[in-house]
Amino acid sequence: MKLITAPLVGVALLGLCAGPFALAQAPQTSGSAPASAAATGVEAKIKAMEDSWAASQLEKDHGASVLEGLLAADYHGVGAKGEIRNKAETVEHSRSDTDTYTSSKNDSMDVHVYGSSVATVCGTSTEKGKDKDGKEFSRSYAWVDTWMERNGQWQCIAGSGTLLTKS
């Protein structure tokens, strides 16, 4: 009987110890109730940074200077056409964009906060303008970005976007 009891006690203790760690890793979502004040603050901060990113498309450098501050040095992402880029390549891609934007905005965002230093945001956005040949366009994207707080600063460490419509 002792041979069966010892493993059962060990498994029970392991379950008791692991439970709090599992709960700490559970996502805090903008739709879950009740969200902690810290998670709500993180959600607002990340949404503001995402909105800044979208709006920066209208700037002369198409947001390259904004991306310099938002993207982590070790950032990697997948563009809407499947191209994999690091931070420098992503910034240069924005800087060399030949389109002229009249509108760039996020349509929806759903932030999930994991613990105290990681968050993901899934969203959709729409951009409108003219291409280098003067042809008008309206593009919609679905995207996901992963953010991490490092030394008190939230940075985007990874991202991926998918072109949904093109006209």
Image: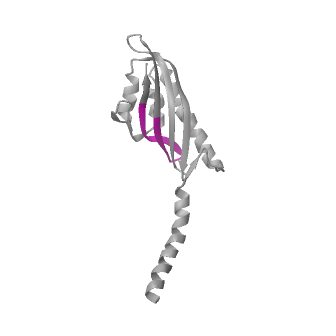
Q: Residue furthest top?
A: 134
- Report the colour scheme: one colour
107 part of magenta stretch: no
**Rendered residue at 44%/28% (across/down):** 164
**In this orientation, which residue lies closer to the viewer: 155 or 43?**
43
Query: Is residue 149 found inside the magenta-colored segment of the image?
Result: yes
Image position, residue 60 (x, y; %): 46, 19
Most foreground residue, 75 or 152: 75
Whole-percent x and y of residue 89?
35, 32
First to last magenta residue range? 143-162
- Decide if residue 14 is on the left or right side of residue 133: right
Going 54% across and 35% down the picture, which residue do you hit? 49
- Name the outermost residue toward the bottom: 1
Q: Is residue 11 above or below residue 96?
A: below
Frontmost residue, 9 versus 56: 9
**Residue shown at 41% from the left, 15% from the top:** 131
List the single residue furthest toward the left: 83
Residue 53 locus on image (x, y percent): 50, 30
User: In the figure, is residue 33 to the left or right of 7?
Assistant: right
* Image location of residue 161, percent across then percent down: 42, 34
- Relative horizontal placement of residue 59, taking residue 94 as reference (left or right): right
Q: Is residue 58 above or below residue 43?
A: above
Q: Main secondary structure of the magenta part?
A: strand
Can residue 133 be seen here? The reply is yes
Residue visible at 37% across and 27% down in the picture: 93
Q: Can residue 53 be seen by looking at this rendering?
A: no
Q: In what quadrant of the picture does the C terminus appear?
A: top left
